[in-house]
Amino acid sequence: MPQQEPAQQPVTELDARYSSALNTRPGAGEVVATDWADARRELGAAEIFWLSTVRPDGRLHVTPLIAAWHEGVLYFSTGPDEQKAKNLAHDPHCALTTGGNSLTEGLDLVIEGTAERVADPAVLEEVITAYEAKYGAHITSPQGTFHGIGDAVRKGDVLVFAVAPSTAYGFGRDDGVYTHTRWSF
């Protein structure tokens, strides 16, 4: 079972090499690292994530998916015969990324960790509840894109993986201020 939300905050570092105040307006203030609480809020709100895994032959595989941040862990699901499931069976190290496409605003996040398959029925029910709360009608409505995923998880037709961050990165953009934050767990 992956670690739960850490009792203490991760070590937070601003990488000044990649952080800059491009806007030199008066009173702009010092460039500071992004707070982990802000990153957690973004992880909770993000609808699409990109999962990066490595194929057995060493080639990369990147694919979009939905995921839910719950108690300090990112959860996602996949079919047992999908490429990402095969890759994770070979090498569980992965990265999940999310963010926006704007040059001037937003926070891009990269979560690195080890994907662990979730089999505990109680945890699976928590993940289903987190998915339903986050994605609403996309999961709960018969017309929803992911309708039936809860039952598929319960029957074992869909695998659920948990990724507790080992390292995370935040790339912030706010009105000409660019930040590169690293969180170590």
Image (spheres, grey):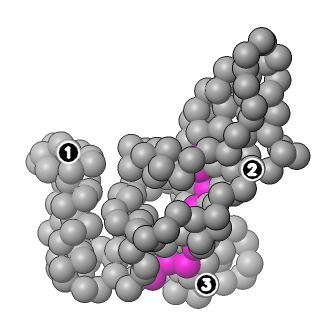
Disc 2 versus disc 1: nearer the observer? 2
The answer to whether residue 78 is visible is no
The local crowd at label 3, few if under 14, some if 14 to 19, many if 20 or more residues have their Cα within 10 Å, is some
- Mark 2 = which residue? 14
Label 1, secondary structure: give it: loop
Instruction: Classify 9 as above or below 172.
Output: below
Residue furthest out toward the top: 26
Front residue of 119/24: it is: 24
- Mark 3 = which residue? 91
Distance of mark 2 from mark 1, alpha carbons? 36 Å
Identity, as a three-letter code, of the amino acid under mark 2: Leu
Residue range in magenta is 108-116
Q: Which label's residue is closer to the chain start, 3 or 2?
A: 2
Label 2, secondary structure: give it: strand
Distance of mark 3 from mark 1, alpha carbons? 32 Å
- Mark 1 = which residue? 136
Image spot of residue 55 (x, y percent): 65, 77
